[in-house]
Image: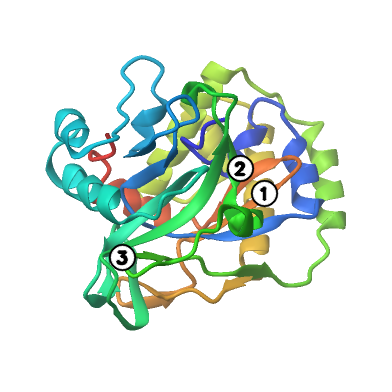
């Protein structure tokens, strides 16, 4: 599972996959979802034993863009992404494993807006490059088959320590006490009323949901069902999972830099929660996804 896209918990149920109900209850690790861009992948290629940097295109099945030298970066990339990768190649500490993180900015300031959220640190950061690592990969050799894992439980083994040239932003995250057992039990009962769909139809439903969010329309199950041409009970079940997710998000907190969106202090973009049932994101998509749809600065600069 390459870390190309983290799912919203509510979207996973459309095809009848109910593992999210167990995901809500299982012991988990959590990390802060930093709103950085673009994503950077770096580490030691197990095939060549050489250090590399790149974007998520290092995992491409066909045109693999992996950079061992500055010449490789000039060949594979251009513009802002190339500038960032040149600095990454010079400044990221050499890592035996393979890591992915989000670019926050270059040193010399205490305030950064890498994407839609503005981050305010307690003091000016003097390091050359600021990165928020969040994922590590394991592979038997071929990067195209790499498996993604949350970094939160592996920081010590990978020794991701900041250096004079590189600042790693790795805030701690936690969740307050709340028992979701009863509401998950209720959701499991409600799921029996739903007519689930195949993968192709699920993609169409997700597009409808995103359109509602993008246009600031109310996520009303009946309206969603009409627009998506699907079972209304399925969308009622989807909305219930969405509500459970939002309840869980409301009791999460972190010790990261102050996050500001439209002049309002927020807790951050969200969190990544991982356990034996998967790795998913806890995000208030009616706030952050809507903004990202309209103004994500690096939405077209990821390769």
In the depicted view, which residue is nearer to us: 234 or 50?
50
Please identify, in this view, whether the residue under mark 3 or under mark 1 is nearer the observer.
3
As helix, strand or loop, the secondary structure at mark 3 comes to: loop
Q: Residue at x 81, y 54 (%)?
A: 183
As helix, strand or loop, the secondary structure at mark 1 comes to: strand
Left or right, 63 with reference to 242:
left
Q: Could you tell me if residue 296 is visible in this image?
A: no
Which residue matches tag 1?
A: 274
Cα distance between the residues tagged 1 and 2? 9 Å
**Percent of width and height locating residue 48:** 42, 26
Where 90 falls versus 111 (above or below)?
A: above
Left or right, 220 with reference to 214:
right
Name the residue furthest top.
Answer: 62
Identify the disc placed on residue 149: 2
Q: Residues within 10 Å of mark 3 (few under 14, many from 20)?
A: some
Left or right, 49 with reference to 85:
right
CB atoms of marks 1 and 2 within 8 Å: yes
**Percent of width and height locating residue 241:** 68, 47
Where 97 falls versus 112 (above or below)?
A: above
In the depicted view, which residue is nearer to us: 103 or 5?
103
Answer with mark 1 or mark 2, whichever residue precedes in sequence. Answer: 2
Please identify, in this view, whether the residue under mark 1 or under mark 2 is nearer the observer.
2
**Percent of width and height locating residue 165:** 31, 65
As helix, strand or loop, the secondary structure at mark 2 comes to: strand
Answer with mark 3 or mark 2, whichever residue precedes in sequence. Answer: 2
- Quadrant occupied by the C terminus: top left
Q: Residues within 10 Å of mark 1 (few under 14, many from 20)?
A: many
Q: Residue at x 22, y 50 (%)?
A: 84
Which residue matches tag 3?
A: 165
Cα distance between the residues tagged 3 and 2? 26 Å
Answer with mark 3 or mark 1, whichever residue precedes in sequence. Answer: 3
């Amino acid at each position: 599972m390459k870390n190309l896209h983290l799912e919203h918990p509510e979207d996973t149920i459309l095809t009848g996959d109910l593992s999210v109900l167990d995901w809500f209850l299982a012991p988990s690790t959590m990390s802060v979802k930093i709103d950085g861009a673009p994503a950077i992948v770096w580490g030691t290629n197990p095939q060549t034993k050489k250090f590399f940097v790149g974007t998520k295109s290092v995992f491409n099945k066909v045109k693999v863009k992996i950079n061992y030298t500055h010449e490789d970066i000039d060949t594979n990339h251009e513009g802002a992404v190339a500038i960032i990768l040149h600095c990454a190649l010079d400044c990221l500490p050499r890592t035996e494993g393979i890591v992915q993180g989000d670019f926050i900015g270059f040193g010399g300031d205490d305030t950064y807006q890498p994407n839609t959220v503005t981050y305010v640190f307690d003091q000016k950061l003097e390091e050359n490059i600021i990165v928020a690592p969040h994922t590590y990969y394991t592979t038997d050799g071929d990067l195209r088959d790499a498996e993604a894992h949350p970094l939160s439980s592996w920081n010590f083994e990978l020794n991701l320590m900041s250096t004079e040239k590189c600042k790693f932003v790795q805030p701690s995250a936690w969740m307050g006490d709340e028992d979701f057992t009863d509401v998950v039990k209720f959701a499991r009962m409600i799921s029996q009323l739903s007519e689930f769909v195949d993968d192709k139809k699920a993609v169409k439903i997700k597009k409808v949901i995103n359109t509602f969010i993008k246009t600031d329309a109310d996520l009303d199950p009946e309206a969603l069902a009409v627009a998506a041409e699907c079972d209304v009970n399925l969308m009622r079940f989807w909305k219930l999972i969405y509500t459970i997710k939002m309840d869980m998000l409301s009791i999460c907190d972190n010790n990261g830099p102050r996050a500001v969106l439209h002049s309002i202090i927020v807790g951050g973009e969200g969190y990544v929660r991982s356990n034996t049932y998967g790795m998913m994101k806890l995000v208030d998509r009616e706030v952050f996804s809507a903004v990202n749809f309209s103004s994500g600065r690096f939405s077209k600069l990821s390769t």
